[in-house]
Image: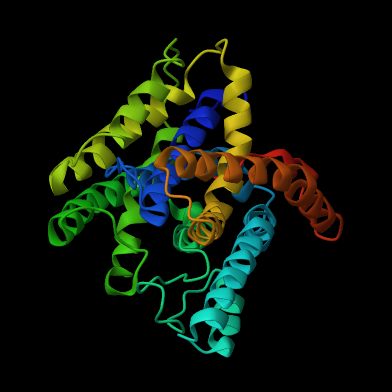
Amino acid sequence: MHVTKRYETLDGLRGVAALAVLWLHITEVLHVEPRPVSAHLGVDFFFCLSGFVIAHAYEDRLKTVLSFGGFMRERAIRLMPLAALGAVLGGLVVLARVVIYHDAPALGVLGATALNMALLPTSALSVTNNFTFPTDPPLWSLSFEVAINVAFGLLVLRLTTPRLAAVVIGAVALTIWTAARNGGLDVGWAWPHLADGFARVLFPFAMGVLLRRLPVWRNHLALALPVVLAALLLAPNLGAMGQAAVVILAVPVIVYVGAGAAPSRADGVARWLGLMSYPIYVIHHPLLRVIQRGAEMVHIRNPAVLVAAGFIVPLIAAYLLNRFYDVPVRAWLATWTPCRRAAIRRPAT
């Protein structure tokens, strides 16, 4: 699939997935209902979309003019400013808790923050439910994103389509086995199932790369796809095999159809959702913990108020951080690296 246009529909779908994950964590952190029990599959959608977009943006360049080091520099500039900020914000939240409850060493919090800023997991803190990224739990998926990016950058020259198809087929079996063994695919974010994160990222990312090599299917389904994706992510408990089916069958179809979707009246909204999706995903969890603590202090228990705050605060923060922090910082970083400044405007994957 060789398309030079911007993928507005995919931008919008990324935003839908980010909002679904936000809703899931609102219910978990703020203790409200209903809980969207399938929303964690939004992360698997992110991985598939990432494979497609990374292949589109970098595969040809890696085979011609871009070195592995240059590729990783560009990925670091795209991912690290917000990821590091998310770890710092989360570290401050955890540190405030430690000051109040004295349930972990302050040095442990500082060490965990430093490691999480570098997208490295840590077991330094025992007060955060076995999270591999206790300062900002969603960063677990970015650590696997970086790992799969490294593998892609190193192997792309040898990754013929037959070999890639073989990887995808093997990863299908691994995905089914992982889902069956764990009772689902909500894995990779805690120490007991950390290794399963590799299984979780392999199929969707490899499938996304493969989808980019397929012919374009032009269609006019741009407005229907967000509804379909939202319905899947907000579905009741699908069971282990149901979750595997969504990841193996539905997610690739949505990405493939979205990549060929014709422009629609909603493209402006889709572009905005795409821009907001990464900052929302990275910084929402620390903010939700601040909201939760603040609500406890002032005795706010109204679920509607909590849900409204849980959506509005991260959305406003995402907009401000994108405009006044992420874009300027990446522009500054690009001035002293060989990376192309065009990468600054590329949406997150």
Residue at x 86%, y 55% (from the top left corner) = 335
Comparing 144 with 306, the one in front is 306
Comparing 31 with 21, the one in front is 31
In the rendered view, tell whether residue 62 sits above or below residue 144: above
Comparing 69 with 118, the one in front is 118
Q: Is residue 21 left or right of residue 107?
A: left
> Number of callouts in the render?
0
Q: Is residue 345 visible?
A: yes
How does the figure colour the protein chain or chains? rainbow
Q: Is residue 298 left or right of residue 231?
A: right
The quadrant of the rendering that contains the C terminus is: top right
Q: Quadrant of residue 309?
A: top right
Q: Position of residue 281 (x, y in %)?
A: 52, 49
Q: Quadrant of residue 274?
A: top right
Q: Position of residue 88 (x, y in %)?
A: 64, 68
Comparing 16 with 335, the one in front is 16
Residue at x 48%, y 57% (from the top left corner) = 145
Residue at x 60%, y 40% (from the top left corner) = 315
Q: Position of residue 143 (x, y in %)?
A: 49, 64
Residue at x 41%, y 56% (from the top left corner) = 29
In the rendered view, tell whether residue 174 sits above or below residue 96: above
Q: Is residue 117 visible?
A: no
Q: Position of residue 185 (x, y in %)?
A: 25, 53
